[in-house]
Amino acid sequence: VQSISQNLPDLSLKRQGTIKRQQNIIQLFLGLFFWMQLLLILLALTLIVLIFPGTRRYTYFFFGQSIIIPLIWMSANIADKFSNLLIDFYLNRWAKNAQLINPNSNRYTLRVSTYSNALKSGTSFLFITIATVGTVAFLGINLTILASAGGVAFVFAFLSRNVVEDMLNGILILWTDRYAIGDVIQIGNISGFVENMNIYITQIRGGGGRLVTIPNGKISIVENLTKDWSRFEFKIEIAYDADVRKALNIINQVSEEIQNDPTWKDKIIEPASILGVDSISHQGILIQVWIKTQAMQQWAVGREYRLRVKEAFEAAGIALGVPHQEVRYQAHQSMQSMNN
């Protein structure tokens, strides 16, 4: 079981590479099929225009508008699909080489998935831009005239400033590996599962299924709860008059039991760190424990650990802390004299 669990990251990386390769090939052939159908339809329309004498003089114009422009966009689309193949191929090769350094880490699988989406969105934007410029140039539209329009220039400058800001920060996020698709992160007061990410935006699936979209330019401080490994922080308050050493022994025993359990031992990286008595107050005595787990396993380990500690405390008769309040009543001296 242990050898299988150690090979899981490598198996996951290979499976992900195979799936992405198949998807890219299918998308490439579907794109070719679509554009071939469109070209055949346009060629048929061109022949129809050529056949009738009344429309024959428009054949060249129709051919140029309906054939050359689709050819421009078809070439850009095919180049984009082919670049997707190259991106996934080189990312997979990079991840396999990096996996040899840290074979037990699943981090490279997440990074490949994240980088793949980001680079594909970037190349798609590049090829769309090239196709747009090619179409405008073929139609004979002067770009300097469009640029000289004050309103158009202002809107373009404003949008490009935001886009460039988002893109640069997105590149930095990817370069420094702050988070990846599949991580659980917190940005300000927004937390959740990173469902999608590219160089422009990050989408987080939060509580209640809400999907929050954040421009990368607005992201500064990020708390990553699942990068490389995670930690479950357990706090429990026992009654003030409870036997503290007995409670600590029970917690230590539960920690050893869950770590030796075949169901949970692969999810726990290190023995539990029992920090001991963390505070003493009128509510009781606070005991704190840290357990280092595999990434994203802290919640499952935490639920099982709480259950076992609760059952063990009940069996040993250790009560939980309850807030105490003391009320004192003192009669006023004048009231006492009146009674006398």
Image (cartoon, rainbow, N blue to C red):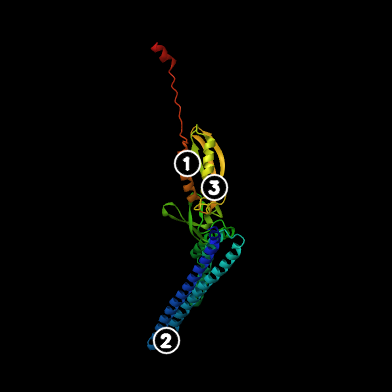
Q: Mark 1 against mark 2, which lies toward the viewer?
A: 1
Ranked by sequence position, the earlier of labels 3 and 2 is 2
Q: Residue at x 43, y 85 (%)?
A: 59
Q: Is residue 321 above or below residue 12?
A: above
Disc 3/disc 2 C-alpha distance (Å):
80 Å
In the image, farthest residue toward the right: 101
Disc 3/disc 1 C-alpha distance (Å):
18 Å
**Residue tagged 3:** 291
Q: Is residue 40 above or below residue 283?
A: below
Type of amino acid under label 1: Ala
For the residue pair 61 and 32, the one nearer the viewer reads as 32
Q: Is residue 167 above or below residue 248?
A: below
Disc 1/disc 2 C-alpha distance (Å):
92 Å
Type of amino acid under label 3: Ile
For the residue pair 52 and 13, the one nearer the viewer reads as 13
**Residue tagged 1:** 312
- Residue 307 in picture, x, y percent from top left: 46, 45
Near mark 3 (Cα within 10 A), the count class, few <14, some 14-19 or many ≥20, is many
Q: Is residue 184 above or below residue 251?
A: below
Can the viewer see residue 43?
Answer: yes
Type of amino acid under label 2: Arg
Q: Which mark is residue 57?
A: 2
- Element assignment for label 3: strand
- Residue 58 in picture, x, y percent from top left: 42, 84
Ranked by sequence position, the earlier of labels 3 and 1 is 3
- Element assignment for label 2: helix
- Element assignment for label 1: helix
